Amino acid sequence: MAKQKFLESSERFFQLPKKFYQQETRVVARALLGKVLFSSIGASVTAGRIVETEAYLSERDLACHASKHRTPRTEVMFGRAGVAYVYPIHAKYCFNIVTEEPDRGCAVLIRALEPMQGVETMQRRRGLTDIRRLTTGPACICQAMSIDREINGADVTRSNSFVWLEDDGTFFSQKEAINTIRIGVTSAKHRKLRFAVRGNSFVSGPLRMR
DNA sequence: AACGGGATGGTT
DNA sequence: ACCATCCCGTTG
């Protein structure tokens, strides 16, 4: 499988363990900058470096889907850390990873990637060739990587998962990272729970936020 | 059963 | 700034 081939290519690369996601949600959101998101779906492997995330803090956060109470949609958010929470919105999908301890209802939304592998596949799935627009925005990532409701509840720390994350040693310093208000939310819009790589051209949102 | 809003994104 | 499109939670 392509995943094995990639893992063998460098000993520094390793899959992020469950323990990583059990940390406080903002810590996870910040630490995910620089990590690599992989998808092996439909015989194609695609990958990209995470350059933008957002933290959603359960009952502490009115913009979080799990802030009020448990519903069928948000069920997996109350489960184990390291599980994918994929929800549909405006006929598209967004990909999150559950954090902290079970029953907390917290997650990190992956908002933008810098393409690294399977660019042609992602171009085909997105129906465009412009690299800059390939994986900028949460729904664009899902379309490029074929992530849909089938992935909801999948454990991204499991080996042989359809979706997983790796650490290749890339780290963005405090100077290289920015912390701003989130994009698209109407409630709790003042909260600085968005993390992004300063100046990275694959980051979403208004230019002033980059 | 009906309704309204949304963690979007592409176009005007 | 507008709106296509559709799922989900709420209300009746």
Image (tube, coloured by chain):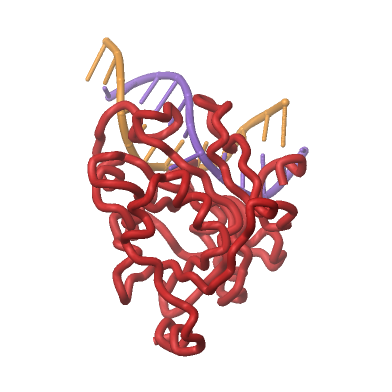
Chain colours: A red, B purple, C orange
Quarter location, residue A127: bottom right
Q: Nearer the viewer, residue A3 or A30?
A: A30
Determine whether, in the image, residue A160 is placed left or right of residue A175. left
Residue located at (60% from left, 35% from top): A181
Residue located at (27% from left, 46% from top): A101
The percent position of residue A66, horizontal first and vertical second, equals 33, 34
The percent position of residue C3, horizontal first and vertical second, equals 62, 33
Q: Nearer the viewer, residue A203 or A172?
A: A172
The percent position of residue A201, horizontal first and vertical second, equals 73, 57
Image vertical order of residue B8 relative to residue A84, above or below: above
Tally of numbered tags:
0
Image vertical order of residue A63 relative to residue A45, above or below: above
Determine whether, in the image, residue A66 is placed left or right of residue A118. left
The percent position of residue A20, horizontal first and vertical second, equals 38, 59
Determine whether, in the image, residue B2 is placed left or right of residue A114. left
Residue located at (35% from left, 66% from top): A17
Q: Nearer the viewer, residue C1 or A134?
A: A134
Q: Is residue A85 visible?
A: no
Q: Is residue A22 visible?
A: yes
Q: Quadrant for the N terminus of chain A, please.
A: bottom left
Residue farthest front in this picture: A174
Q: Nearer the viewer, residue C11 or A116?
A: A116
